[in-house]
Amino acid sequence: MADYAISLTSVDKNYRLWGRRSQFATLKSALLKRDLRPSPEASVAALKNVSFAVDRGEAFGIIGRNGSGKSTLLKLISGILKPTSGRVAVNGRIAALIELGAGFHPEITGRENVYINGIMLGLSRREIDERFDKIVEFSGIRDFLDQPVKTYSSGMYVRLGFAVAVHVDPDVLLIDEVLSVGDEEFSARCVAKIQEMKYRGVTLVFVTHQLDQVRNLCDRALWLDHGMVEAVGDPMRVVDAYLQEVSGAPASPPPKVEEAPEKATESSIDEERWGSGEVVIKRVAITDEWGRELIALGAGTGITIDLDVEARVPQDDFVFGLGIYHADGTCVYGTNTEVEGYVPGKIEGAGRVRFVMPSLDLVAGTYRIDAAIHTRNGRAFDYRRNVLRFVVGSRVHDVGVYRPKHEWKFDGPITFTSVDALRRNVPAPIAEAIREADKK
Amino acid sequence: MQQLHTLYRHRQLIAALTARDLKARYRGSILGFFWSLANPLLLLGVYTLVFTKFFPQQAVDPYPLFLFSGILPWTFFSAAVLESTSSVSSNAGLIKKVMFPAEALPLVVVLSHLVHFALAIPILLAAILAFAALGKFTISATIALAPVLMLLQAIFVAGIAMTVSSASVLFRDLRDIVANLLQLGFFVTPILYLIDNIHSRVLRALLRVNPMTPFVVAYQDIFFFGRVPKPSDIVLILAYATASMVMGFFVFDRLRDTLAEAI
C-alpha cells in the first residue's frame, strides 16, 4: 500500500466549450453537417499541470477564488470527472460531500432516502441497518423520518444528507463548501464530527471559502489560482498569502529576518515568519516584573510578553495576537485584541505591546510563542511563528499543561507525618542529587 | 465483461433505485400500479373495437387475446426506451455531484418497466382463462416459456436504453426522434395483424428488419398460438439481444466521460 491517500501528477483538465450554435446539439444538425461527433468550438483549461499528494490521515484544504478550479479538482479526485491528461490516484474508500442530499428523491420518505443515499455512497443494506440509528440521531430529525422528503425544509434536507455521508466511514472524505450550511448548532456538530474523523485517521480534503476552517482544521493547504497551484503548505501561510493577494496588497516578501534584533530569534531557530510587512514585530521578549528578560522561568511567576512593533505605514485596521504552545504542539492559550473587544484606532511609528500575566500557571515543560499583527479579517502584516521559546521549571512533578492555583486541605482523621521540604521546594532531579550527596 | 462486473457490484443500488422509482411513481395515487396498465388496456379496447366491429378480421380469433399478447411486450419496449432517453439527463444531480455508475440509470428504467410488464401478465392470464372458460380458447403449456422470453427482451431493451440514454445527452432532440420512431414502430410490428397476412413485399421486408418483430411474434406464439417459437425467430432474438447489449455498452462507454460535463 502506498503511503499517500491522494496523488495527482501533472493533471490537466480542459472543459470543452460548446459554442452558441452547437450548444443545443441536435442529431438533426449533426446529420446535416455529416459529422456525428459533436465538435467543441474551443476548450477552456480549468486545471493546468496540477501536482500534489495528500498523506494518509492528513487534513488538506483547498482555497482560491470562485472559478479557480477548486470544485473541478474535487470532482477529479472523486472520479466524477476524468482528467484530460495526467494521473489521479486515490487509495481507499472515498466519499464526496459535493452536494448534500444529491440523489434524494422528493416523493419518498426520509427513511427510504437514507437507504438509497447510503447505497449510492457505497454502503451495503446491512451496513446501513447497523448505522441507521446513529444516522438518524445525528441528523436530529427523527420525527420527520417517515415523511416524504419533499416536505422537508432545506435545513432538514442538508442535515439528513450530511448525516448519511459522514457515516459511510470513508478512508478519504472530500468536502465541498458544505460546512457552512445548517444552523449554528448543526454546523458545530459537523465540525466536531469532522474533527473526530480526522482523529481516526480519515484523510480529509476541503474546499471552502471559510478560511478560519482551513486554519483550524487543516494540516496543509493548497491555493489554486486560475487552475494552477499558487502555493501549498502550512495553512496559516497559504491562507495569508491568499488574503494578501485578494486584498490587492502588493505581494511583498516577508520582512527580512535580519531587521529583527538578534536576541529575539536566537532562541528559536525554527521560526517561521510571513506577512505583508506594513507593520512588523521587531522583537518579542518575556520579562519579569523588574524588566529582566527571561528564557527560563519558574511556574507561577509573573511575566510580561513584550512585543516591540513598528508601523511603517500607518494602519487603522490592526489586531495583536499571541499564542502559547506546548512543545508537543498543543495550543495552551491563544488570544488577540480583536476577540477581547479592542476596536483598533490607529497605529503609526514604533510602539510596544505588553501582555501582562500576573502569574504563569503552567506545568514544567518547554513552550513556544507565536506573535502576530494582522488585519481583522486575518491578513497578516507580520506573523512570527515560534518566535520565542521558553522553559518552565517546577519544583513539583505534576503533569499536564495548566497548573491551577491550589492547595490541599484535609478534614477529619487524615494525617501526614511531614511534608518533604526538599520535594516541595526543589525540582525533583535536583532533590535526588542533594539526597545522594547527603548520603556520602 | 468488466462493465457487467461493475453492474453486478452495484446491484444493490440498482435494486434500491428501481424500488424507489416504483414507490415514488405510485405514492399518492389511489389505483397504484394499475395506472401503468391503463394505456395498454385502453389500446386493447380501442383496437379490439376497431378490428372486430369496424374492420372485422377473421384471421385470428379471439382477436383481443392475440392483441393483448402483442401489446404488452410492445408497451414494455416503447415505454422503457422512451423514458430512458431522459433517464441520464434528468438525473444530472447524480452524475455531476455523486460518484455514480451512470449506466444504472437506464437499467433502472428498464427494470421498473419490466416489473410493470410482469404485473400485467396475470391480467393476460386471467383473460386467457376467461376465454378458455367460455370454450373459445385452449390453454397451452408454452406459456411457461414467458419468463425466458421476458428476460431476453429485457436484455434487448436494456441495450437500446443504454444507447439512447447516453446519446440523448449529446443530442437533445433524440427524445423526439425516438418518440416518433416508436409510434411508427407500433405499426410496422405485427401486433394488430398477422405477418403472414401482409402481401406487400416492401412492408414484409420492413417487418423483417424490425428487431421487435421476432420478440412480438414469439410472445404471440407462446401465449396465443400455443406453440414454441420458430427456430429462426429464436436465433434472431438471441442475436438482437446480444447485439443490442454490445452496442449499449460500447456507446455508453464512449460517452461516459463526457456525460458529467455535457449534461
Image (tube, rainbow, N blue to C red):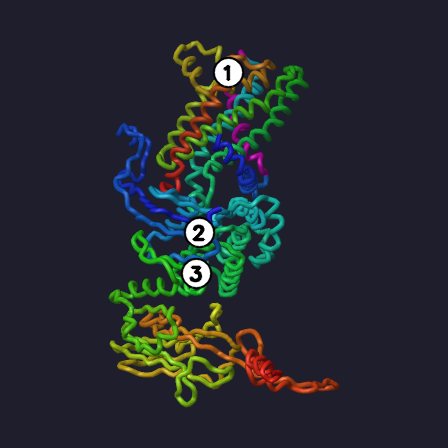
Asked if residue B57 lies in the magenta stretch, the reply is yes
Q: Is residue A186 above or below residue B70?
A: below
Quadrant housing residue A63: bottom left
Left or right: residue A412 compared with residue A193 = right
Left or right: residue A416 compared with residue A265 = right
Range of magenta residues = B31-59
Magenta stretch, main secondary structure, is helix
**Residue drawn at 45 percent across, 62 percent down:** A217
Tell me the chain of label 2. Answer: A
Q: Is residue A87 above or below residue B43?
A: below
Q: Residues within 10 Å of mark 2 (few under 14, many from 20)?
A: many
Left or right: residue A258 compared with residue A233 = left
Q: How crowded is mark 1: few (under 14 residues within 10 Å), some or many (20 or more)?
A: few
Check residue B197 in the rendering and tell me which mark sits there, or answer none. Answer: none
Are labels 3 and 1 on one chain?
no
**Type of residue at label 2?**
Ile
Quadrant housing residue A405: bottom right
